[in-house]
Image: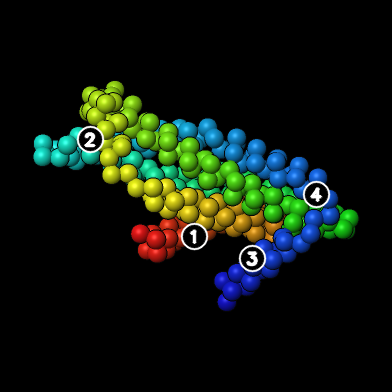
Amino acid sequence: MRFFTHFGKYLLMLKAMFKRPENSKMYWKEFMHQCVEIGIGALPIVVIISLFLGAVTTVQTAYQLVTPLVPKSTIAQIVRDSMILELSPTVVSIVLAGVIGSKIASELGNMRTTEQIDALEIMGINTKTYLVLPKILGALLMIPALITISAALGIWGGRMAGQMSGILDNSIFDIGLRQNFSPYNVRFALSKAYTFAFIVSSVPAYYGYYVKGGALEIGRASTSAVVISCILILFADYILAALML
């Protein structure tokens, strides 16, 4: 029963976001602020994770391909498709759920407990549109861009790891990188990126917006938001794979 209560409040929150803004310039400024917070703030951790994901994928793939019947260029194909199809969209989104999701939930939760949201509503501002919508739109713009950067850096990290460890030369890696490439994989990855971006931004916003209590409840709401976001990301990952692949 609690599930349907939360799900109904979540849908009502999303519905209330799409009312006409009171001041377009104010909303645009908040949207750009969220783009900087989400995009630039999460970029360092995305870069580090992506490089090591690509490097580890290269080393482990080479360890498993012990037969001389399989050309070494196959390693590059596996690294490329693994980063584009699964590792960059899913792993990076789960990391961003912890980085961005907890920040959104704690920020809105703090505003709720200190009655800043109530003050904005008294001033006639639609707080759901002003506080939640820019965060979701900023995530929909920046998280797919971060996932695209992650895929490129992961492939480059795998290429560097192959060269530095002596597994395969860059020329062989580049040959495998161009073999049997399917543009549909990129479209599938972007579909996952936009879906995960909506989950990472909207679910923590719901938990933070409706938090009740004090600092202890804010921490619990942030934890719940991250856990639920990760579960929904994995569930959506399976659904999209079953429908689109």
Q: What residue type is disc 2 on?
A: Ser
Counting other residues with Cα less than 10 Å from the Cα at mark 2, is it few (<14), some (14-19), or many (20 or more)?
Answer: many
Q: Nearer the viewer, mark 4 or mark 1?
A: 4
Give the mark nearest the N terminus, 3 or 1.
3
Q: Position of residue 163 (x, y in %)?
A: 28, 24
| Label 4 – label 1 distance at C-alpha | 32 Å
Compare residues 53 and 214 and report the one nearer the observer: 53
Q: Disc number at residue 10? A: 3
The reply to whether callout 4 and callout 1 are in contact (CB within 8 Å) is no
Please name whichever residue, 27 or 180, is drawn nearer the observer in this view of the structure. Answer: 180
Amino acid at dot 4: Ser
| Mark sitting on residue 24 | 4
Report how far apart the C-alphas of labels 3 and 4 lie in the structure. 25 Å
Disc assigned to residue 232: 1
Relative placement, left or right, of 156 versus 22 is: left
* Pointer 1 local density, CA inside 10 Å: few below 14, some 14–19, many at least 20: some
- Mark identifier at residue 73: 2
Considering the numbered disc 4 on the image, is that residue within a helix, a strand or a loop?
Answer: helix
* Earlier sequence position, callout 2 versus callout 3: 3
Task: Tell me if mark 3 has few (under 14), some (14-19) or many (20+) residues whose alpha carbon lies within 10 angstroms of its own.
Answer: some
Which residue is at 76% across, 62% downward?
Answer: 19
